[in-house]
Amino acid sequence: MKIYNLLLMTSLLLIMGSCGNDTKNADDLFSVEIKDAKNAYKETDVLQVSVKNKKNKTLDKVSWSLDSDPIPEASGNSTSISLNNRKLGTKTVTATITVDDQTYDVSTEVILLSSIKPKLYTYKIVETYPHDITAYTQGLEFENDTLYESTGQKKESTLRKINYTTGEVYKSVPLADQYFGEGITILNNKIYQLTWQSKTGFIYNLNTMEKKGSFVYGKSNEGWGLCNDGSTIFKSDGTEKIWTLNPETLGEDGHIEIYTNTSRIKSVNELEWVDGKIYANIYQKDAIAIVNPENGAVEGVINLSGLKDKVTQHDKLDVLNGIAYKGEENILYVTGKNWDKLFKIEIIGN
């Protein structure tokens, strides 16, 4: 009886295994082909895709998706897929094939670039203010005329409330020694602060700067920069990705990838929301990228070269980091890690 039951169980498992979506041998049977394939594509391109039927199977049905989003208008063995109004970056084109009640998924990846060339900007220094030379600046944001700053380095990280014109620190809240402070943003009378590699962020009361809670990261491994548009929080993680966070749960709802018309922009750092765009420091670069929050396209680049030369030079001096916006047209406030100056600059188009 035991042998009979074992044989019955084995037969059932074999039957169950023969149904459903068989991905194990899908690539042996099919592949996705793109006509006149290129290294990268633009939003204006239309992909001509087809299924290569390696074993000459009779196909009952073929449906298509892009990054798991079904494309109802695309069907059949050969079809076209428009890339218009898509987020930029690496996209996965998938064909779901049905043969004799068995389904197979096969896919290929394409890179989608911006269709516009970024506009180039320079700057003019309007005012110069004192800044704490020991502050390893990670995040910078105004609330009315008060400047808030997050500083980094383990055992030195803080959240600060500052008089930006004098450099006076009104209040400084230290982080526990194991945390490396990163970007901040202010929303609904709360300050949100990231830490670097601890996968933990903190929430503070804006008025008292008392810590009220914490949150953990999802798919993003690190915390770099934060900003918000009044309803959604945006988070960079040191890659080309900027994540959208639900302000109620701090969960990651999705992401955009930052690309120009020619290449990927990696190491996205400190963020600031300015008139409907994300302004992003690029780590180790004297530049700020102006990013479309809908698709990740870099619409402009502000060249800030030479600014670092205008601060006191010393052994701990580090890169440009820290963007703050106070609502003044074409005006930003910027500083860097261990810089002794905060600059009010005017952005000038070429």
Image (cartoon, helix red, strand yellow):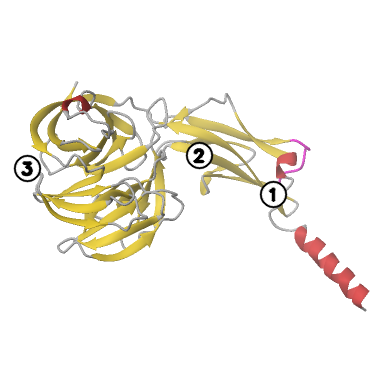
Under mark 3, the amino acid is Thr
Q: Which mark is residue 169?
A: none
Under mark 2, the amino acid is Lys
Residue position for label 2: 91
CA neighbours of label 2 inside 10 A, class few (<14), some (14 to 19), many (20+): some
Query: Taken as a whole, is the magenta stretch helix, strand or loop?
Result: loop
> Residue 113 at x, y = what percent?
42, 30
Residue depicted at 57% across the width and 24% down the height: 36
CA neighbours of label 1 inside 10 A, class few (<14), some (14 to 19), many (20+): few
Residue position for label 3: 165
Q: Does 84 sit left or right of 53 as displayed?
A: left
For numbered disc 1, what is the local secondary structure? Answer: loop
268 lies above or below 22: above
253 lies above or below 224: below
Under mark 1, the amino acid is Thr
Say which of 87 and 320 sits in front.
320
> Residue 42 at x, y = what percent?
43, 29
